[in-house]
Amino acid sequence: MNTISLKKSTSLRLDRELYNYIEKLAKRENRSVNNYIETVLADATRFHEPNDETKRAIKEARQERANLKGYTDMDELFADLAK
């Protein structure tokens, strides 16, 4: 799967204390401030849109769900996996 993500450069004016707080959160996750802000914004706006291949896979999985065997017993699951 080849994906190219084009980036748009922008600048933000943030309250210094807010920036310092964001910077601290980003460091905790070992990420850059830019990456942290981008991820938080994407999550907050539910921006994540699956590509066509993923959409097809989701559709296929939903269609096949009725034919799949479900398990409530781990021993039964492992017995079937061992077959």
Image (spheres, grey):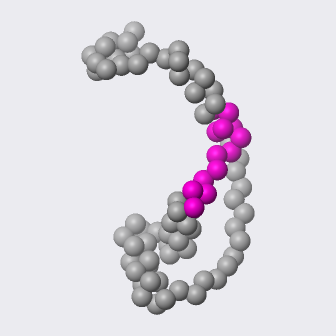
Q: Residue at x 71, y 71 (%)?
A: 8
Q: Is residue 46 above or below residue 29?
A: above
Say whether residue 82 is left or right of residue 45: left
| Part of the protein shown in magenta | 45-57
**Residue drawn at (55%, 66%), measured in percent from left and top?**
41
| Residue 67 image point, x, y percent | 53, 15
Q: Residue at x 53, y 71 (%)?
A: 37
Look at the image and tell me whether residue 35 can be seen: no
In the rendered image, which quarter is residue 61 located in?
Answer: top right
Image quadrant of residue 80? top left
Task: Name the foreground residue: 23 vs 45.
Answer: 45
Asked if residue 13 lies in the magenta stretch, the reply is no
Residue 50 place in picture, x, y as percent: 64, 46
Foreground of the two, 78 or 22? 22
Percent position of residue 11, x then y: 64, 83
Residue 68 point in image, percent of width and height: 49, 17
